[in-house]
Image (tube, coloured by chain):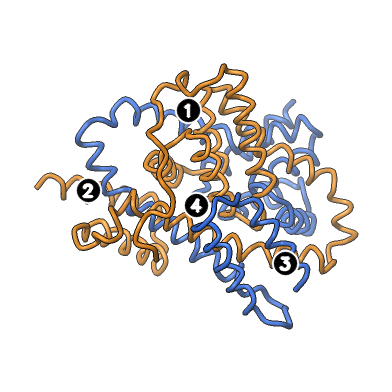
């Protein structure tokens, strides 16, 4: 039982202290899992991270679930997942309740009028931060030029058709095999 | 960049979750399918799930673009993984706390199962060019999808793109926020706060 509480507590700290989305939380997870506790060795952690990146789904919760399972089985995975996800979801819902109660107010409308352009900028920043990983992967002897038309084709298809993004993602992976 | 919004915005969301159609069971099932898809196809690192969540949420008319932008703002201002925050938020709006739980589990459990179950297999095949090639090909697609998301959301946040001259404050905020974050690593929560304060000051006049 104390192990489950410890898992919940360790990943709750990661969830509450980690700003900037899942990938930004990896160093915090490493501190909790490898440095402060000896749940995983450094090389086990790196393997898990590399493997987690090859699988779909959010990386922070995958790392939490995997570590939890290694420490205490499925109950451990559940405790770690609850730790990393629950506190911030509760905070999100509380914020939403406040927003719903007050959003008709002029002051909230004016605030959001200024917030929305910033949010679009943050979305554009996601593109910017992800560009090097996506367009210039290391060690490709054929270079990375075919990746640009691939990105362009995905954008064009999204703009002109209603094709589901999941289909485009899988199609991109298949093109990657063939290249 | 196209002059008009690439796709028609869906009609406004119902404020009351109970008005979203279906009984509770139907809404929970829809949440499970929607976020299960996001979890299974959100390959290639952090941001790939954003276009997927947008698609599910718009196709099912759970949130308007403005409401999605506001949710993204909250999500960036709060700590924690953003995909799970958005899933919990959408789930709560559609079907209360149970909806939040279902959306979270649908998003995370399948891939946690895969991670635990396939780890040994991965260690044996980690140097396989198949895995690397797959990821290499799908990441540029994620870039294309993310650019589409930015283009799709821009009119909600910045006004009609053709009328940019009338919306200089909003364009200035967006460009300034991007520059501040890209060049000086300014915290997104601070940028959101600054944007809101600028909105308060501007609209008072």
In this rendering, the label closer to the viewer, 1 or 4:
1
Q: Disc 3 and disc 1: Cα gap in Å? A: 38 Å
* Label whose residue precedes the other's in the sequence (3 or 4): 4
Label annotation for residue A175: 3
Circle 1 crowding by C-alpha within 10 Å: few under 14, some 14–19, many from 20: many
Mark 3 vs mark 2, CA separation in Å: 45 Å
> Could you tell me residue B91's position as x and y percent?
54, 30
Chain in orange, by letter, is B
Label 4: state its secondary structure.
Answer: loop
Cα separation, mark 2 vs mark 4, equals: 23 Å
> Which residue was labeled with disc 1?
B93
* Circle 1: element type: helix
Q: Nearer the viewer, residue B193 or A14?
A: B193
Give the quadrant of the N terminus of chain B: bottom left
Confirm or deny contact between disc 1 and disc 2 (CB under 8 A): no
Which shade of the palette goes to chain A? Answer: blue
Q: Which residue is mark 4?
A: A20
């Amino acid at each position: 039982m104390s192990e489950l509480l410890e898992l919940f507590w360790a990943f709750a700290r990661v969830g509450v202290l980690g700003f900037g989305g899942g990938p930004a939380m990896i160093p915090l997870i490493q501190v909790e899992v490898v440095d402060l506790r000896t749940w995983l060795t450094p090389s086990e952690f790196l393997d898990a991270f590399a493997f987690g990146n090859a699988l779909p789904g959010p990386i922070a919760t995958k790392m939490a679930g995997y570590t939890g399972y290694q420490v205490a089985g499925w109950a451990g995975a559940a405790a770690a997942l609850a730790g990393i996800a629950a506190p911030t979801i509760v905070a999100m819902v509380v914020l939403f309740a406040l927003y719903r109660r007050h959003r008709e107010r002029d002051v909230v409308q004016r605030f959001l009028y200024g917030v929305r352009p910033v949010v679009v900028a943050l979305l554009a920043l996601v593109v910017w931060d992800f560009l090097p990983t996506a367009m210039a992967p290391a060690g490709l002897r054929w270079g990375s030029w075919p990746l640009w038309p691939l990105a362009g084709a995905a954008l064009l298809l999204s703009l002109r058709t209603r094709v589901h993004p999941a289909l485009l993602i899988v199609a991109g992976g298949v093109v990657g095999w063939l290249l | 960049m196209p002059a008009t919004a690439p796709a028609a915005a869906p009609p406004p969301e119902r404020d009351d979750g109970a008005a979203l159609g279906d009984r509770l069971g139907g809404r929970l099932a829809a949440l499970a399918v929607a976020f299960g898809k996001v979890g299974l196809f959100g390959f290639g690192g952090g941001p790939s799930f954003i276009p997927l969540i947008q698609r599910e949420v718009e196709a099912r008319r759970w949130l308007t673009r403005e409401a999605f932008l506001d949710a993204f703002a909250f999500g960036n201002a709060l700590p924690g993984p953003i995909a799970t925050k958005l899933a919990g938020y959408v789930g709560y709006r559609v079907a209360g706390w149970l909806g939040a739980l279902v959306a979270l589990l649908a998003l995370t459990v399948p891939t946690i199962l895969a991670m635990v179950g396939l780890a040994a297999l991965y260690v044996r095949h980690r140097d396989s060019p198949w895995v690397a090639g797959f990821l290499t090909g799908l990441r540029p697609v994620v870039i294309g999808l993310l650019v589409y998301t930015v283009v799709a959301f821009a009119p909600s946040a910045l006004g009609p793109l053709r009328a940019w001259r009338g919306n200089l404050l909003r364009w200035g905020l967006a460009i300034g926020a991007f520059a501040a974050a890209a060049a000086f690593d300014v915290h997104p929560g601070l940028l959101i706060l600054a944007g809101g304060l600028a909105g308060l000051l501007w609209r008072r006049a």
